Amino acid sequence: MKKKSIITLAALCLLFVNCKPKSADKEENGVDSLSVTKDTVAAVEKVNDAFFKASGTEPFWGIEIMKDSVRFTSPETEKNFTIPYDKPNRAMDANVISYEAKSDSIHLKFTIQQGKCSDGMSDNEYNYNVRASLKRGKDKDFKELKGCGNYIVDKQLQGNWVLEELEGKKVNPKDFEKKLPGIEINAEESKFTGFAGCNGMGGKLFYEKEVLRFSDIVTTEMMCPNYNTEKLFVKALQSTTTYQIKKDKLYLLNPDGTKAILQKAN
């Protein structure tokens, strides 16, 4: 009897070791079974921060665009997915950019068009209209989705930057009575304030992927000995179209070259 009990116990142990539900990986994923694997999703999301976010209602849905992939979310979390997208296409005659992403079971197409947009449920301000088409698995037709979105200003721009070089010439601290000109960028609110050299200033940021513009710039109106340098700095901001950040230095650029270089303040 004792020997029989030992054999039975051994058989039960073997059964528990070998019995693993086949769908466990999929349930843990929360990702469409034929999109990308869990490991790939985790790696993508860790490395690539989203630079654009959109959402819609009726039904609720969300899109986050990262460097090489797009993540789609909905209340049905088991239908969420993250997949790579093809090279986007920008229309020549309008500020419209189109994306397309495919896997064996997912086909997502969406366009982003500049223009004021309301989600109809909040006071949030959106600068882009988003239209998406989604088809899953054996669906014959695309499901049409509408929503609003905004670009997310690069977090690396956040903080205080002190002017170091202007139009190819080093800035001399002795030329300024108070302090060196500079700007403070609030990435979350897409705004900036600053010191132009004598006058205070402020304005808004227009940001898209690889695009940066300083707009609606206003300054106080004190007359100063270095007023010409101040005007040149403001003009450099107004003419900026893109940027680079290297070793705590912010390079403001346009097709003509480098307009200004600023050093990240400690």
Image (cartoon, helix red, strand yellow):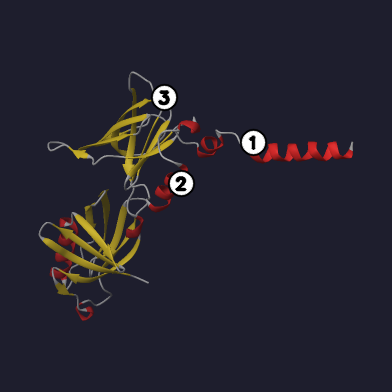
Q: Is residue 219 visible?
A: no
Q: What residue is shown at x 14% (from left), y 65% (from top)?
A: 232
Taking 5 as reference, is 143 left or right? left
Amino acid type for the residue under numbered disc 1: Cys
Q: Residues within 10 Å of mark 1 (few under 14, many from 20)?
A: few
Q: Residues within 10 Å of mark 3 (few under 14, many from 20)?
A: few
Amino acid type for the residue under numbered disc 2: Asp
Image quadrant occupied by the C terminus: bottom left
What is the CA distance from the residue labelled 3 to the residue labelled 2?
Answer: 31 Å
Q: In the drawing, what numbered circle is on residue 188?
A: none
Q: Nearer the viewer, residue 191 or 87?
A: 87
Image quadrant occupied by the N terminus: top right
The residue labelled by disc 2 is 39
The residue labelled by disc 1 is 19
Q: Is residue 234 visible?
A: yes
Taking 42 as reference, is 157 left or right? left
Q: Position of residue 8 (x, y in %)?
A: 79, 36
Residue extending furthest toward the left? 256
Taking 35 as reference, is 255 left or right? left
What is the CA distance from the residue labelled 2 to the residue labelled 1?
Answer: 23 Å
Q: Are marks 3 and 1 in contact (CB under 8 Å)?
A: no
Q: What residue is shown at x 22% (from left), y 68% (from top)?
A: 261
The residue labelled by disc 3 is 58
Where is residue 176, by image quadrant?
bottom left
Q: Residues within 10 Å of mark 2 (few under 14, many from 20)?
A: few
Amino acid type for the residue under numbered disc 3: Glu
Q: Position of residue 143 (x, y in %)?
A: 35, 23
Nearest to N terminus: mark 3 or mark 2? 2
Nearest to N terminus: mark 2 or mark 1? 1
